[in-house]
Image (spheres, rainbow, N blue to C red):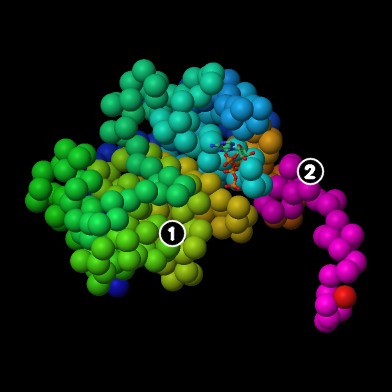
Amino acid sequence: MADDGEQIDERAGSAGAEAGPAAAPGGSAGPDSGTAGPPAVRVQGLWKKFGEQVAVSGIDLTLPAGRFIGLVGPNGAGKTTTLSMVTGLLRPDAGLVEIGGHDVWRDPVAVKSRIGVLPEGLRLFERLSGRELLGYIGRLRGLPGDEVDKRAGQLLDVLDLSGSQNKLVVDYSTGMRKKIGLAAALLHNPEILFLDEPFEGVDPVSAQTIRGVLERYTASGATVIFSSHVMELVESLCDWVAVIAAGRIRADGPLAQVRGTAPSLQDAFLELVGASDRGAGRELDWLGGGGAR
Ligand SMILES: Nc1ncnc2c1ncn2[C@@H]1O[C@H](COP(=O)(O)OP(=O)(O)OP(=O)(O)O)[C@@H](O)[C@H]1O
C-alpha cells in the first residue's frame, strides 16, 4: 500500500483561513469574522420536521474554513438531517445555508462544484466496478478523461483498493464501500468535504488510511466536516467541534473550548447532552447471573 496520500496531487491553492477567536458555546458567534474569505458553512435558523417529529430545531452555526470539524451528538440528535440539508440533499422547512458564501438552494451548481459528500447509507452504482465508478463520477464532474484515470488510480492505490478495482461495487464490504465513496467524493478536489460517519464499519487499518488521507487534505487548507459518535476519534482528529442534541447546537467552537475543564471530550459531551448521570441499566436486575431466569 502506498503511503497515505503521498501520491495525491497537491491541492491548487488553499480554501482556508485561520479561524479567529472561539465561537460562543450554544450558538456560533461567527468565527473568522474579520479574516479573509467566507466561512466554510453558515447556517441560520435551520428547521426540519418529519411529521410531528422535530429533527432540527432552529440551528445557527458558523464553521470556519480550513479546519477539521467534528459534528457530534447522540443517536437521533439530528446530525444526518443537518448534514443532508447543508449539502443540498434535503430541503429545509426553514432557514439559510451558505457554503463558502454561496446559498445552497439558490446557487446549487456553485455549491456542488465546491463540495464532496460521503452521505449516510451511500447509494452507489452497484453494477460498476470500483474503477468504473470513479471513471463515471469523474466524467460527471467534468474532469478530462486522462485526469480522471490518473486521480482514480492514485486514490485506489492510497486507499488500498487497487486489488479490488475491477470487482463490482455490489461485492464490496462495508469498509470498502466507505473507501470507494470517499474516493468518489475527493475525485474533483473539493474545497469542503462532508462525511457522515466515515469510520463506521471500517477496520483499524483502513481507518488509519482514511485518516491519513483526510489529514493530508486538511493540511493543504481544505475543510473536513464529519459526523461521529466516537469521541476519542473526534478528539484526536478535529480542531473544531459542534455538539448537537435533540436538534439543537449545545456547543461549538475550537476543541479546547468545547472540552473546557472536562478531562476529555467524552466527559464534556456527556455533560452537554445531559447524559452523565444516566444509570447504566440499574433497573435491569434480571440481566446476567449466568442463567435464564
Ligand atoms: N426520513 C425520516 N422520517 C421520519 N423521521 C426521521 C427521518 N429522518 C430522521 N428522522 C428523525 O429525525 C431525528 C433526527 O434523525 P437523524 O438521523 O438526523 O439523527 P442522527 O443524529 O444522525 O442519528 P444517528 O446518530 O443515530 O445516525 C430522529 O428522531 C429521527 O427518527
Q: Secondary structure of the magenta portion, mostly?
A: loop
Where the N terminus falls, by quadrant?
Answer: bottom left
Q: Which residue is mark 2?
A: 274
Question: What residue appears at the point 45 percent right and 31 percent down from the top-left corner?
Answer: 90
* In front: label 1 or label 2: 2
Badge 1: how crowded within 10 Å, few (<14), some, or many (20+)?
A: some
Q: Can residue 152 be seen at all in this image of the molecule?
A: no
Q: Residue at x 49, y 20 (%)?
A: 96
Question: Is residue 53 visible to the viewer in this orientation of the structure?
Answer: yes
| Left or right relative to 194: residue 130 | left
Q: Considering depth in this image, is 36 or 165 the residue closer to the camera?
A: 165
Percent x, y of residue 29: 60, 25
- What residue span does the magenta drawing correspond to? 265-292
Determine whether, in the image, residue 277 is placed left or right of residue 28.
right
- Residue receiving disc 1: 211
Q: Quadrant of residue 13?
A: top left
Residue 211 x, y percent position in the rendering: 43, 59
Residue 84 x, y percent position in the rendering: 47, 36
Q: CA distance from mark 1 to mark 2?
A: 30 Å
- x, y percent for residue 133: 23, 53
> Type of residue at label 2?
Gly
Kindly give the residue lying farthest to the bottom in the view shown: 290
